[in-house]
Image: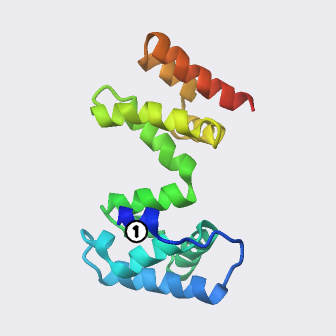
Amino acid sequence: FLVALVSSYRYEGSRKNDAAIESDAQKLNKAVRNGDKTMLIKDEEIVRILTTRSKPHLKEVFKCYYYDFDRDIVEDLGEESGLKDTIYCLCAPQVYFSKILDSAMKANATKNEQEALTRVIVTRTDVDMKDIAEEYNKQYGTPLAKKIEDVAIGNYKDFLVTLVQRALAK
């Protein structure tokens, strides 16, 4: 799934095709409703839609899904966290990255989760760190820079806080 996600051609234009949006919402609903909830990440139709459609198109598909079926697709995916993370990362990256940052700063975080703290802050500082920091504050009730000050130490702490504050100042 990840190989398809990063290697397939994705149209990134702004054109919308309402018929394709409706069709994709119907296909996703059918796949989710009839599929094995633990194997949805291997469903060819789901993979095709998520890997080839533009982000604006996917946002419209998920709105259409909600409108047509009165359910959020993320809720319908059950425990399929890989697909949920993909949807958040494509359509609401600030939600996805604030979740990653929170996991990275927990006392029981794994080494991979801890490394994600540096990776997210360094790679997103000039992209959308301000949005991520605002979402983090909204989700967890603590400013991101304050949380980093509480859990990190020394020069590492200073480095991360400086990057976050620089992004917030923009």
* Percent x, y of residue 124: 57, 40
Which image quadrant: the N terminus?
A: bottom left
- Visual colour scheme: rainbow
Residue occupying the point 56% across, 47% down: 94
State whether residue 41 is above or below residue 133: below
Q: Residue at x 62, y 90 (%)?
A: 19
Query: How many neighbours does mark 1 have within 10 angstroms: few (below 14), some (14-19), or many (20 or more)?
Result: few
Q: Dot 1 lies on which element?
A: helix
**In the rendering, at what x and y percent does residue 113 appear?**
34, 36
Residue 109 position (above or below residue 5): above
Q: Where does the image place residue 167, in percent across and percent down from the top left? A: 67, 31
Asked if residue 80 can be seen in this view, the reply is yes
**Image quadrant occupied by the C terminus:** top right
* Mark 1, residue position: 4
Tag count in the figure?
Answer: 1
**At label 1, which amino acid type do we have?**
Ala
Which sits in the foreground, 79 or 110? 110
Work out whether residue 71 can be spotted: no
Which residue extends farthest right?
170
Please name the residue shown 45% across and 62% down the image: 6
Question: Which quarter of the figure has residue 74?
Answer: bottom left
Residue 122 drawn above or below residue 158: below
65, above or below 158, in the image: below
Q: Position of residue 154 (x, y in %)?
A: 46, 9
Q: Is residue 17 left or right of residue 153?
A: right
